[in-house]
Image: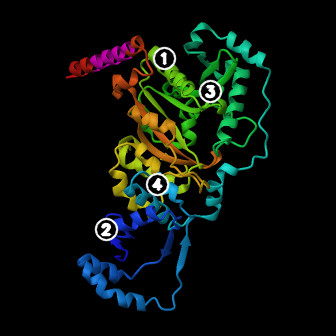
């Protein structure tokens, strides 16, 4: 085939388009494919000549071969790719892209300590045992003691409550326990006995409660950004620990809710209902407080995904869903460093219309014998369906080195057909009417000034 050469669009030395026959041969053979990356390059003169005319590369090849005599080659072998995994891509073009991802990820220089921390995150060992559960009766009594207004709605046997952390010490303890259990299972977690921090006491907690089994099955943490900022300052926001906000950001953001620390305990994750109940709870909360049309929070991509897969997701989000205006007004405290070698996937990713199309290219860390792709994180997928925009990316070293994708959803821009899946008819009308009236008032004020 044709020799690798400089590509101006990616500013890298890359392979030309692979021959389709090679991909068909890989699929037909049914044998494992072993990626081999040869680290090195021809001379600058060779690449510059090739930009003038491809035939010049052919003329210069003998000289390039001769001047490598006595030099040392860096060969990097990847893990075998099983034939079942290639067939699971569903199309020869996707299979080719998958092999390319595995191949070009071998080119990335990564610090050994970071590789160890991320690639083996699922096998992390925690020295601290998770705290024991408190008496179930304490939780039942606390739920029964909540005011009627704290109960937002019910979905089947699941009740959704909202309460400030300081008013529910026993439920908060259980939430901290279940968070740590759930997050450790996917390579995250704090490593402490409880996943609780200084924000939990004054943040509100949206709690999913199984009425029949009398137990917490999931939760979200939220806060009204304008109120907590006015009372305590912006350093009282959890988001401030991950991102440094410049002054205009929160002003431009307007009334918004910070969301985060969401979980569904492992026993309930086989069903979609608990997460749907929590989302309906958020929608009900917003319909009761309609001025809060924006949701912002970090969506984590755990180190359970291999590094190349995480990089593909970040690149897809940057190229399809980035808000460059608001994103310029904040800075991640631990910025994500992309794989420079995977810039060659740009054209493939730009052709994708939905993030789910990435699934066939994704892999989990250490899951070398998987015969299928990995799903995109469900929260990320759902927020994008609501019209979410991504503002920035941060590495959370205290949380299993996950990638935090700071995501903003403006529900005023979410179509009724989508929003009505979570908000009932009266709530949706109340929300739309509030913002229609707000827009009329703003327009009237502008006209009055002129």
Q: Residue at x 53, y 30 (%)?
A: 259
Q: Quadrant of residue 426?
A: top left
Residue position marked by numbered label 3 in the rendering? 218
Per the image, the residue denoted by label 1 is: 284
The reply, left or right, for residue 108 in relation to residue 304 is left
> CA separation, marks 2 and 3?
49 Å
Q: Give the Cα separation between the discs numbered 1 and 3.
A: 17 Å
Residue 8 numbered tag: 2
Dot 2 lies on which element?
A: loop
Q: Position of residue 167 (x, y in %)?
A: 68, 18
**What is the image's colouring?**
rainbow
Q: Earlier in the sequence, mark 2 or mark 3?
A: 2
Give percent across and percent down for residue 88.
47, 51
Q: Residue furthest left?
A: 450
- Looking at the image, is mark 4 or mark 1 earlier in the sequence? 4
Q: Residue at x 39, y 63 (%)?
A: 24
């Amino acid at each position: 085939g044709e020799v690798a050469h400089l590509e101006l669009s990616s500013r890298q030395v890359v392979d030309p388009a692979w021959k389709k026959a090679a991909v068909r041969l890989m699929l037909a053979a049914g044998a494992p494919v072993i990626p081999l990356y040869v680290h090195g390059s021809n001379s600058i003169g060779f690449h510059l000549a090739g930009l003038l005319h491809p035939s010049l590369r052919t003329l210069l090849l003998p000289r390039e071969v001769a001047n490598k005599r006595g030099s040392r080659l860096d060969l990097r072998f990847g893990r075998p790719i099983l034939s079942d995994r290639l067939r699971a891509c569903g199309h020869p073009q996707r299979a080719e892209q998958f092999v390319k991802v595995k191949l070009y990820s071998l080119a990335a220089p990564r610090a050994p300590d970071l590789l160890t921390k991320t690639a083996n995150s699922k096998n992390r060992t925690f020295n601290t045992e998770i705290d024991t559960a408190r008496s179930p009766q304490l939780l039942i009594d606390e739920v029964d003691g909540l005011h009627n207004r704290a109960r937002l709605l019910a979905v089947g046997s699941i009740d959704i409550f909202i309460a400030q952390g300081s008013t529910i010490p026993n439920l908060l303890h259980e939430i901290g326990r279940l968070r740590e259990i759930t997050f450790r299972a996917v390579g995250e977690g704090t490593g402490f006995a409880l996943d609780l921090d200084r924000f939990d006491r004054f943040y509100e907690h949206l709690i999913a409660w199984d009425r029949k089994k009398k137990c917490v099955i999931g939760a979200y943490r939220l806060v009204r950004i304008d109120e907590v900022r006015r009372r305590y300052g912006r350093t009282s926001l959890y988001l401030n620990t991950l991102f440094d906000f410049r002054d205009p950001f929160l002003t431009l953001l307007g009334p918004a809710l910070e969301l985060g620390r969401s979980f569904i305990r492992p026993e309930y994750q086989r069903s979609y209902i608990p997460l749907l109940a929590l989302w309906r709870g958020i929608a009900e909360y917003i319909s009761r407080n309609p001025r809060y049309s924006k949701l912002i929070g970090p969506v984590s991509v755990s180190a359970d995904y291999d590094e190349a897969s995480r990089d593909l997701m970040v690149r897809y989000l940057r190229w399809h869903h980035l808000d460059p205006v608001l994103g310029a007004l904040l800075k991640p405290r631990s910025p994500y460093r992309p794989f420079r070698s995977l810039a060659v996937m740009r054209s493939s990713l730009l052709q994708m219309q939905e993030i789910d199309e990435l699934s066939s290219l994704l892999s989990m860390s250490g899951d070398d014998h998987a015969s299928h792709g990995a799903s995109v994180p469900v929260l990320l997928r759902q927020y994008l369906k609501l019209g979410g925009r991504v503002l920035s990316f941060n590495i959370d070293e205290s949380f299993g080195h996950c990638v935090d994708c700071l995501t903003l959803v403006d529900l005023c821009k979410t179509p009724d057909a989508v929003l009505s899946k979570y908000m009932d008819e009266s709530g949706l009308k109340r929300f739309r009417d509030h913002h229609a009236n707000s827009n009329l008032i703003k327009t009237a004020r502008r006209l009055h000034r002129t």
